[in-house]
Image: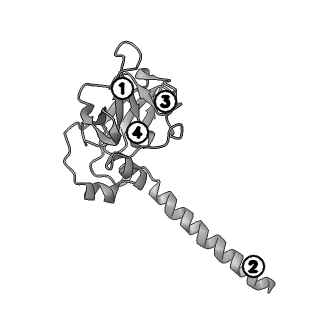
């Protein structure tokens, strides 16, 4: 009986470690297998959601392509104060500099301006009984978050972004 318990324990350990490995494979950076990813190309992309679904991790796809939202205070960048650049996790487009990031206490990374005017686009959003302005990547049209008029000077805007669709690269000194 003891041998059977040991064999069952080893089987469970091996089985669940393989499940963990499969999940870790999904958590790999999207750009490793993403032919559209570039940090220098700003050409507008026209890629189907079916193609994106085959390339992106499920959380990036859900937020970026299906306009989802991560829970407040859970994203990896909401409290980050390291100097660097934030890129679109879907296509690599440069979006924000850390110099434009501020602590808004809303639970999501917040910026007062994009890195350049064409980095993002704005779309009227009337979902969920609200009138808001959606912010999408200027290169791949992926959902990033929303913009509000309650930010700090000089723009008085608050780009409220989802960490899951951002990728951060710290400055090198």
Tags 1 and 3 in contact by the CB under 8 Å rule?
no
- Whether residue 137 is visible to the viewer of this picture, yes or no, is no
Counting every numbered tag in the picture gives 4
Asked if 109 appears above or below 18 in the picture, the reply is: above
Q: Earlier in the sequence, mark 3 or mark 4?
A: 3
- The secondary structure type at the circle numbered 4 is strand
Tags 3 and 4 in contact by the CB under 8 Å rule?
no
> Quick one: label 3, few (<14), some, or many (20+) residues within 10 Å?
few
Q: Which residue is mark 1?
A: 148
**Which quarter of the image is occupied by the N terminus?**
bottom right
Q: Which residue is mark 4?
A: 166
Measured as percent of width and height from the top left, residue 86 is found at 40, 33
Q: Which numbered circle lies on residue 6?
A: 2
**Disc number lying in front (3 or 2):** 3
Q: Residue at x 33, y 50 (%)?
A: 66
**Disc number lying in front (3 or 4):** 3
The CA span between labels 1 and 2 is: 58 Å
The CA span between labels 3 and 2 is: 49 Å
Q: Which numbered circle lies on residue 106?
A: 3
Q: Residue at x 35, y 42 (%)?
A: 128
Measured as percent of width and height from the top left, residue 151 is found at 40, 19
The CA span between labels 4 and 1 is: 19 Å
**Disc number lying in front (1 or 2):** 1
| 154 vs 45, nearest the viewer | 154
């Amino acid at each position: 009986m003891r041998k059977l318990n040991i064999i069952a324990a080893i089987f469970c350990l091996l089985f669940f470690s393989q499940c963990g490995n499969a999940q870790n494979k999904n958590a790999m950076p999207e750009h490793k297998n993403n032919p559209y990813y570039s940090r220098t190309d700003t050409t507008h992309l026209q890629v189907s959601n079916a193609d994106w679904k085959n390339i992106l991790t499920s959380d990036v796809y859900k937020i970026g392509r299906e306009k989802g939202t991560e829970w407040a205070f859970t994203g990896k960048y909401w409290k980050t104060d390291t100097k660097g650049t934030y890129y679109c996790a879907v296509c690599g487009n440069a979006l924000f500099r850390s110099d434009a990031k501020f602590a808004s206490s809303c639970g999501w990374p917040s910026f007062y301006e994009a890195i350049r005017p064409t980095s993002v686009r704005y779309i009227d959003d009337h979902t969920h009984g609200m009138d808001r302005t959606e912010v999408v990547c200027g290169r791949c049209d992926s959902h990033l978050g929303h913009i509000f008029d309650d930010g700090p000077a000089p723009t008085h805007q608050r780009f409220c972004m989802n960490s899951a669709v951002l990728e951060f690269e710290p400055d090198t000194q």
